[in-house]
Image (tube, rainbow, N blue to C red):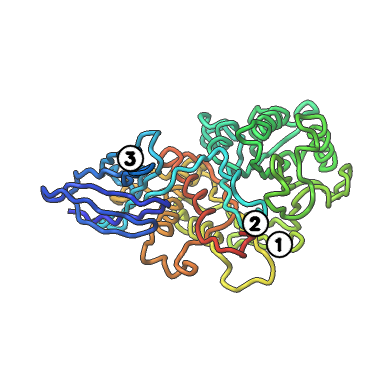
Amino acid sequence: MKHITIVNHTSEILLVECETRGKHEVKVLLPSLYASTSIDRATELTLSTPATNHGDAKEGFTVVPNAYTISLSMDLGAMWKLMNVPGSCPWRIYRCRSSRRHHRLLILPRRDLSSFLANMPDTVPLSSLTLPGTHDTMAFYGWPISQCQSLATPLAVQLQSGIRVLDIRLAVVDSRLIAFHGIYPQRTPFQEILATIHSFLTAPATCRETLVMSIKQEDFLKTPAALFSQLVHDEIVNGPGGLGMWFLENRVPHLGDVRGKVVMFSRFGGSGDGWEGGLEGLGMHPTVWPDSAKSGFAWQCKNTLVRTHDWYNIPSFLSIPEKTQLATEILLPPADAQPFPTLAITYFSASSFPLAFPPTVARGFGYPQYGLGVEGVNGRVGKWLLDFLGGQDDVCEKRLDGDVRIRGWAFMDFFMDPEDGGMVPLLVECNYRGRRPGEEGWP
């Protein structure tokens, strides 16, 4: 027997039917209501919404909703799982292991990841959004040392999958900019990156979306900083969308300021020569960026305090638990109330030679639930998010007024792992939790 706690995070009343000890049970789940039931390992659950009546007594009709049956199987050694449901199902359903005999089933609305920002209020600053991102967005080659993203997730797929913060690393080759990671060329020209982004931001279905692009120079030992900065400027000006596609003010904008635009996050620029407004025309421009600072660091972007975690040079895979803890805790509100807005930026990625290559850190290896291997950062972060969203007891004291408030920009390696993209919907869902009128720009 296993004890299952079911959490309804949709806005609908749900009916849950199951067979327990040969007895048919029907439970009614109100929105955001926790319901517990003891069920057998092989029992299936059937989820539906109540039938609704329309029209008057004479001409009325009844709408019978679809029912979705869910097998409660759990992969060997898995700490959590995105349940397999039909594409027509209006929910995403996660199963999470709290203990050997206690699991949680979390039911979330199925949001359109390709355009999840479209209906968010214009008054919300980007600092109070949870934006999924990719570390070394274009690093598809050089496994296992340099590769950080799967070949199955090119930039266009990332954008459609809900990635909204891009980490573009560039170097100069034959007087043009191409994607690089360290000393390893990643083949994609900057112009191709700009074309993909322009297509996404001008398509009717996604023209109200917003992207943040961090740009960093990878060949700083070879190419002068001023030349690199000038080339970035010139390729943007002459590329699809030109400067009009970019938000270049050195501040954290509100969502309404940047619909259909790319927010520049410049980790280059020198003195800002060649850019209108100098450093004030290079978008968000960090004043400090210490290398692999384990304890994190902070910098000021006008009236916003930017709290940053970028400890990437971990000693070995044995540091994965500590890396995960530091990378996730920064997404929670500061312990002390701040007199101005704060933005959290975190990197779930890390790498070191020879015992912590990017695939190992992100994915882990073996069957950690049974002491055979190590769970990767991505799996641990997914469990952390599910604990908050699902009401796990040992994290509830970190909640605000009984609801989760996780905010920030999160950069990931191999973002589709584990569970075929299961992490991105959890990060997106954080945007709808802990919202209160009059706070964080919420109307």
Tell me which amino acid carries mark 2: Ser
Measure the alpha-carbon separation of dots 2 and 1.
8 Å
Query: Which residue lies under the disc numbered 2?
Result: 127
* Camera-side residue of 261 and 236: 261
Tell me which amino acid carries mark 3: Lys
Q: Residue furthest front?
A: 58
Task: Specify which label sits upstream in the sequence, 3 or 1.
Answer: 3
Quarter the C terminus occupies: bottom right
SS under mark 2: helix
Other-residue count near label 2 (Cα within 10 Å), few / some / many at <14 / 14–19 / ≥20: many
Query: Which residue lies under the disc numbered 1?
Result: 304
| Res. 45 in view | yes
Task: Specify which label sits upstream in the sequence, 2 or 3.
Answer: 3
Residue 226 against residue 187 in the figure, above or below: below
Measure the alpha-carbon separation of dots 3 and 1.
60 Å
Toward which corner of the image does residue 88 lie, by quadrant?
top left
Indicate which label's residue lies in the foreground, 2 or 3: 3
Residue 45: % across, % down: 25, 45
Task: Specify which label sits upstream in the sequence, 2 or 1.
Answer: 2
Measure the alpha-carbon separation of dots 2 and 3.
53 Å
Tell me which amino acid carries mark 1: Thr
Q: Are marks 2 and 3 in contact (CB under 8 Å)?
A: no
SS under mark 1: strand
